[in-house]
Image (tube, rainbow, N blue to C red):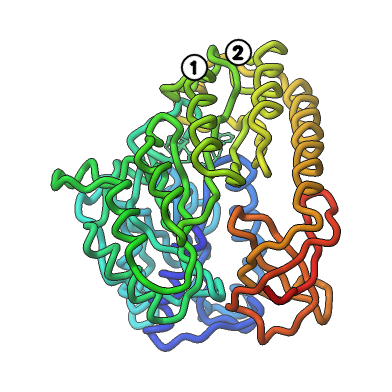
Amino acid sequence: MNIHESEKIAGTLQAMGYTECDNEEDADVIVFNTCCIRDNAEKRALGNIGAIKHIKKSKPELILAVVGCMTQQDGAGLNLRQKYPYVDIVLGTNNLAELNNAILRIKNSGKKSVLIDPNERPEVLEGELKYRTSGCNAWLNIMYGCNNFCTYCIVPYVRGRERSRKMQNVLDEFKTLVDQGYKEITLLGQNVNSYGHDLNDGSNFAKLLEEISKIEGKHRVRFMTSHPKDLNRDVIDIIADSKNICNNIHLPIQSGSNKILKLMNRHYTREYYLETIDAIKAKIPNCGITTDLMVGFPYEEEEDFEDTLDIVRKVKYSSAFTFIYSVRKGTKASLMPQVPPEVSKDRIKRLIAEQNKITKELSKGYECKVYEVLCEDNAPKKVGYVCGRTDSGRLVTFEGSSDLIGQFVNVKINKSQSASLFGEIVEE
Ligand code: SAH
Ligand code: SF4
């Protein structure tokens, strides 16, 4: 979501005549697109803003802007103004469209801008400029905001309520991306399964996927994120029936304990979640299922954590993003009693070890088989090699030149190493 938002920021800058450069020292404008989902994301953003101070000192005409979730928190604008007075522009999440004018203002009259609109705007912006940076992959927002108020999460406070784009606008953008040659399009929303509910025109995610699956061409469709409470059987059926929609579902469970799920306000139980997983596995064989897991949420005891380990063993995720719960000011969970950090650290180590074991075991299952892979990039630090993903979302490295990027190839997996698969192109 943030990468794509940065592409929109870059699109605005490009239209103003700016071009991309490789290092901060050469820049005329630097925009920090911040995240505040966890404390470490926020600290990193502030650290990076602090690290730019010396450049601004020796080059006062450099324009510095801070945008994104962090700025939208209570008191963030004032804090940034006081602690980082050399920042020229601060924009809230609803004010991003004002970047162009804010840059012109500082350039033409030296006037700084701090624009943080507390009232979320109900309308959804269309036709934003984009400077895409993800090769043959393209991101596509289908909605913004979130209504779920999971008790640990800051997103609804900084991104506002759910707002869906009109289905026709999404389909038009999708078709344009296909015509432009993008080979993988990822639909984005905090909870894509509630797409359309706010439009009151009968649109929903299953219908959107169905329309998208009718769009001709050789390309892949992924989407994220699905909330387990809302992933319904219609969506599972469409994925199973469509050749373009990848067999890959990211379904964050957060915790395997019913007690913790309730405290998190997630609106599902482990049993309900496992039923959904069974339905996915029955309809979509070889589906790559990934998840987000959190440890150290308030009141989490050893037996709750054991329930999380148990879910990991039962589902066999192809991979998982694992997080230590991080207190976010203003959320309900911030008022609950906190688990000691050393307990959380111990649990996350055990959780990662368990998941790694499963990833390794699943990787072995890929060996000696042939998969269609979308070649996406040069392999990092391996000259003469490229990499890409299987339909299920697994990363594969294989010998080949960069001419292959953007093409679908058949790759036989020869070797696996934890999450990484290595293979060779075969004719088939
Ligand atoms: N909308 C998506 C997730 C968005 S945030 C969903 O509901 O699945 C991505 C992930 O960050 C979450 O799934 C959660 O695991 C993690 N996360 C969110 N708030 C957090 C917090 N306060 N501390 C630690 N992890 C958090
Ligand atoms: Fe945050 Fe929950 Fe919304 Fe995801 S669904 S963005 S975790 S509040």
Percent x, y of residue 392: 60, 53
Q: Residue at the spot x=67%, y=26% of the render?
A: 314
Tell me where residue 308 appears, x and y as whole percent: 66, 23
Above or below — where is 319 with respect to 84? above
Residue situated in front as seen by the camera: 156 or 330: 156
Q: Is residue 337 above or below residue 203?
A: above
Q: Circle 1 is placed at which residue position?
A: 263
Residue 351, above or below 241: above
In the image, which disc is placed on residue 299?
A: 2
Residue 338, numbered label: none
User: Does dot 2 land on a helix, a strand or a loop?
Assistant: loop
N-terminal of the pair, mark 2 or mark 1, is: 1
* Marks 2/1: CA–CA distance: 9 Å
Relative side of 366 to 51, left or right: right
Q: Amino acid at mark 1?
A: Leu
Query: Which of these two is toward me, 173 or 110?
Result: 173
Q: Residue at x 17, y 45 (%)?
A: 202
Q: Amino acid at mark 2?
A: Tyr
